Image: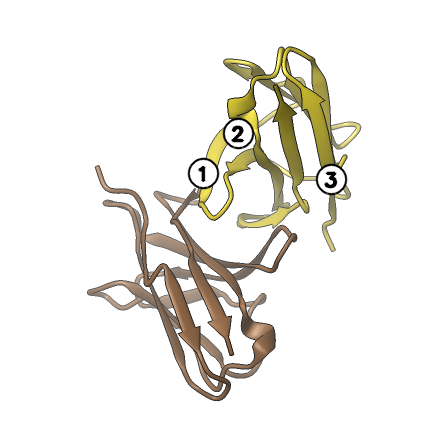
Amino acid sequence: ELKVEQNPLFLSMQEGKNYTIYCNYSTTSDRLYWYRQDPGKSLESLFVLLSNGAVKQEGRLMASLDTKARLSTLHITAAVHDLSATYFCAVDSGGSNYKLTFGKGTLLTVNP
Amino acid sequence: NAGVMQNPRHLVRRRGQEARLRCSPMKGHSHVYWYRQLPEEGLKFMVYLQKENIIDESGMPKERFSAEFPKEGPSILRIQQVVRGDSAAYFCASSLDEGTQYFGPGTRLTVL
């Protein structure tokens, strides 16, 4: 059974600081996704990472994938309050591209 | 360009009643997925449907839950004889093929 673990689960940081969220998964997979969820809202797709060494950046967020280590990171640069949300990573259940297995999410709070 | 639509957004049912949750995929998308999110948990896959076909229902509870995606109209997730443990947010997602899934706003079900 595919397992996806995120850490930390809770992250409180000051504006302007940098931090990294980690996502480990247990078996080979084809694709890794990062989603953002605001309280009471749906999930917004941030990144899709398809291959080893893939790196994608959007604004203050950068995601990378190491398939050998089965690890993805979401790096936050110079955090701002608007980034406060819950961030989920999700992985295809290798062999079936549609069944996403989600981590428990990282609740990020950026304080002024 | 409308996204994934779900209704109702909030649904309150008493124990033993039926809950019907509707999902209209994005225009042009023929793949629909249902996920359940319990409080402070990640999303859990329930079922994957294409028009008139259930492709994978491995995440569906064996009893009381059913899903359909008719040729015309929205996908329906039906929960019969609801119990308190069914209280959760239910998200529908759609995709063009087995690619990136786009999520709807969710239906928050409360069972009294």
Label 3 resides on the chain identified as A
- Tell me what residue is drawn at x 40 percent, y 61 percent: B49
- Front label number (1 vs 3): 3
In this image, B4 relative to A89: left or right? left
In this image, B13 relative to A72: left or right? left
Label 1 resides on the chain identified as B
Q: Which residue is mark 1?
A: B100
Do the CB atoms of the residues marked 1 and 2 lie less than 8 Å apart? yes
Q: Report the Cα–Cα distance between label 2 and label 3.
A: 21 Å
Q: How is the image coloured?
A: by chain
* Of the pair A87 and B74, the residue shown nearer to us: A87
Above or below for A98 versus B18: above
- Tell me what residue is drawn at x 71 percent, y 29 percent: A12
Q: Which residue is mark 2?
A: A48
Do the CB atoms of the residues marked 2 and 3 lie less than 8 Å apart? no
Q: Which chain is brown?
A: B
Q: Which mark, by number, is residue A9?
A: 3
Above or below for A85 versus B87: above
Q: Which chain is yellow?
A: A
Please, what is the three-letter code of the amino acid marked with disc 1? Thr
